[in-house]
Image (cartoon, coloured by chain):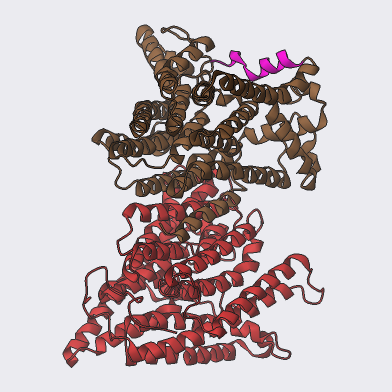
Chain colours: A brown, B red
Amino acid sequence: MGTASAHLQLLAGSALKLLLLPAYHSTDFEVHRHWMALTSSLPLSHWYTDTTSEWTLDYPPFFAYFERCLALLAPLFDAEMLTLSPTPYASPPTVLYQRLTVIFADIALLVGASRLASGTSLRLTVLNAGLLLVDHVHFQYNGLLVGLLLLVLAKLRRGEGGGEVCAAAIFASLLQLKHLFLFAAPLVFVQLLRHHVMRAPRPALALRRLAGLGAVVVGVFGASLAPFAAVGQLPQLARRLFPFGRGLMHAYWAANAYALYATADKAMAAAGRATGAWSVAAGQAVGTAGLVLPDIRAPHCAFLVLLLQAPVLVGTWRRPRPEAIAPAAVYCGLAAFLCGYHVHEKAILPPLLVLSAISPPADPTARGVHARLLLLLSTAGHYALLPLLHQPAEYTLSRALLLAYFAAAWAALTPPSLRWHDRLYLAGFVPLELFVSFVHPLLLSPRLPFLPLLATSLYCSLGVHMSMLLAYRLWAHSSNSANRQED
Amino acid sequence: MGEEPSSWEMLAAMAVAVVFRACVGLHGYSGEGAPPMYGDFEAQRHWMEVTVNLPPSGWYVHSADNDMQYWGLDYPPLSAHFSWLVGQSARLFSHPQLVELHRSRGIETMATRAFMRNSVIVSDVVFFFPVALLCARACSRGRHRQLGFLVQLLGLPAFMLIDHGHFQYNCVSLGLTLWAMYFCLIGWPVAASVAFSLALNFKQMSLYLAPGLFCYLLAGCLRAATFRARAANVAKLGTAVIATFVVCWLPFLGDMSSMLTVLRRVFPIERHLFEDKVANIWCTLSLLPGLKLKTMMPIPSLVRMTLLATLGAILPPCALLLRRPSRLGFVLCTTACGLAFFLCSYQVHEKHILLPLLPASLLASRHPLLFCWLSTAASFSLFPLLKRDGQALPYFLLQLSYLWAGFQLQRELDGRSIYKEWTLLGRCGLVTSLAAMLALHLAEATLPPPERYPDLHAVAFAAWACAHFVCAYFGILYCQWRVSLVEQSHTPFDASDKGAHSLFWWDTHAKVH
């Protein structure tokens, strides 16, 4: 790729984001509008108690501060958007302003990604199709958040003392922006402890470093939480941030382990009773209390995630190689996605973006694993996002965007050494798409309304599971090769 | 550098082109939410409604079910057949309400909009993309160049904004025309005649490009050694053309009167010299005091005048091509003829600038920036129309990206210094032209027009664009003359001499400019 086509691609990406201004936006648009209105018109003590709108604030305080800052410029476009109201408000200037804030917040992604990746990997990260769909159509600020995560990983990968303290501060802030990123907390903790603290030449220095890290984290958390603690809001805040009543699974099943689990559960129930258990919930499930198989609750999920992450955490403990931090983060992200509690389909984006920011390894075996992983995970993860955009206007747009990303990734990884079963799996998306978009709506509808979503979840879940194994192999390779280099 | 781009890269470029088309389609279209007449979107939909519900004999005839005052069909029969096809697929894809007789008027639901937009994208992908890919492979060498050329061809703002923004199916006739040109260049004259006849039967405006194709094919026919061979060639092409026309006109061949009805609808003399503000010479001349051509002369003499002017303008390029036919000469001649028609002929719409732009695009691999300049002027001339359609934002984004891409591709071609081959005059011209366009845009955005001249901005846009097209016409004529001196001779009847991928690499020879 020449520099011209590199620039051309980044430019095309920015033009694309602006072109998407009138595209469909989900209720998340109103969520963020409401939070702007909430944080700008009520005192801090009411932020986590207000129930004017059903979209109550359920992100940590830094994100609330962020919304408060966004509200400062909002009157330049339309002051009306800062009025608290239970009904959605989306005047054209409001849409323009909010879309522009997402586009500008993407600068964080560009900065983070350019520290970690270069060349094609950089473009595959910044112009990720899923991110475009979720942030610039559906409406969220994932670019900003993932950008910070990439920055943390880049600093950890360099493995320098000052950088690691900085990484700790950024990561603590990231947790205070969105607590979804807790999935990486054990990994970052282990890495900092082993590489920053315990490799210090003298115990006194190790203690000093530990105290330094502790002070940084406590400082960040204090800055975030202290104002709320002062007004006695912490318990309410915790209730909002961790709403365990919401159930194991989201309305549309994320492509994770529980999609398989719940399907098996329903299938067994249906087989057992030979009655209409299917029609009750599957696909659009609300409650997911197990019908036959045991019910899974939040603590079980946390345990499962830690169990899955354990090999990488233990490995990192034994060999805290800075070079292996990004693959380890991919693995930990996938573990949290597969077994986390009430996971959204969008949660695939952090591990996927970290993965695409990893440049192809030099070692041929690792290179093959990396190519397979990137193609499988991006395809399965992206395709599982499509049900978010259910409006007819974005149909062609979203499919073409996915195809473009896939083809670009394929061209960048040439020749991707795919196994026959990888190819078979990837080819399977064609009949799946035909079924979901044509066969079902034209021939079967309105019978079996849950079938397209169920098929999508299950098929994508398969790919994410395969990716999980590949992610482990990728991490093992980079960890070992780093080991060998050192020996 | 010499290797072919992987097909995945080409696929990615084409998928991105689809993404951009879909994005442009999210913005407004002609006549959106503007009863009672709406706009081109409703016209196309109405034709689907009429063709699906009435027998072909009723398509072009005023009746209780077909009000010719309300977007009566005025394109040739292939367009009507195409509308029928799209209308039937609307029924197939469970949007029967889109083509319900009478009751579907002005229907603009989210689902039907999406269907209409998708139908243009599919037509584009079916008719235009494959031939664009073939041309990219044939017209340039090296992977960056092929990819860059494909981007220039598929990313043309004017094509995208008119078809996927304003709403038309030009991609079909332009695609067919490009197929015809491609067949000419690889030496398949019969296929070229069939493809171009289909284009003519889809939109009569394809006639703008007919002289170039005609002369190239004719030159080929006349170059045969014996009289018998010449006659055989002419007969072959004539048969192909007539057969294609017969197939397209089959439902109307029954009696003379229905054929005449169609012809009268397709060539409406009673409409006037130009509509709105067109960047051609008549509209620009009307600016001069005392030259209100529309009111000065009766229609027949206007028609005669434009006919003479057009003939005069297409004569030099056609004569040059006939005297010394060559591939590059053919492309230049077709472009010149397209410009000549646009500048001089009768009843020109601003959208017709797409026609000369099509053959010109084949020159983009050799002169990315020069072509980009022409494209910028063409899109610029469309701005007043696009602004009415709610396409101002896509216009600016595509225009800027495309211009920037042109500079980048030129830089990649020339190494570090762009303009290596540009004269001082060319550089100054480019800067002046772009600066003036920017100034006009700023003026349009900030200064309201004086009350006496409410159209002042539109007129200024048209006149400035017209200046570009006139210069382009003479520049291309000059190039054609230079080319006729150096380029090796070629006609569509010459079998392709080199391998399939080296058909017309203009970057290797033919120093133009």
Highlighted range, magenta: A233-247
Question: Which image quadrant: the N terminus of chain B?
Answer: bottom left
In percent of the image, x 46 and y 17: which residue is there?
Answer: A305
Q: In which quarter of the image is residue A64?
A: top right
Q: Is residue B270 visible?
A: no
Instruction: Kindly identify the residue that appears in the image at 29 percent across and 46 percent down.
Output: A415
- Residue A293, image x, y percentages: 41, 8
Q: Is residue B293 visible?
A: yes
- Relative to residue B335, is residue B400 drawn left or right? right
Who is closer to the viewer here, A358 or A478?
A478
* Residue A424 x, y percent position in the rendering: 27, 35
Question: Is B184 part of what is drawn in magenta?
Answer: no
User: Which is more toward the observer, B265 or A107?
Assistant: A107
Q: Give the quarter of the figure containing the C terminus of chain B.
A: bottom left
In the image, A271 versus B260, the foreground residue is A271
Q: Is residue A236 magenta?
A: yes
Relative image position of residue B332 (x, y in whole percent): 41, 82
Q: Does residue B188 sit above or below A481 in this rendering?
A: below
- Above or below B500: residue A372: above
In this rendering, position of residue B223 left or right of residue A290: left
The rendered magenta stretch, by its main secondary structure, is classed as: helix
Q: How many labels does the image show?
A: 0
Q: Residue shown at 69%/90% (left/top)? A: B291
Where residue B436 sits, quadrant-wise, is bottom right
Quadrant of residue A180 within the rendered picture:
top right
The percent position of residue B16, horizontal first and vertical second, equals: 45, 53
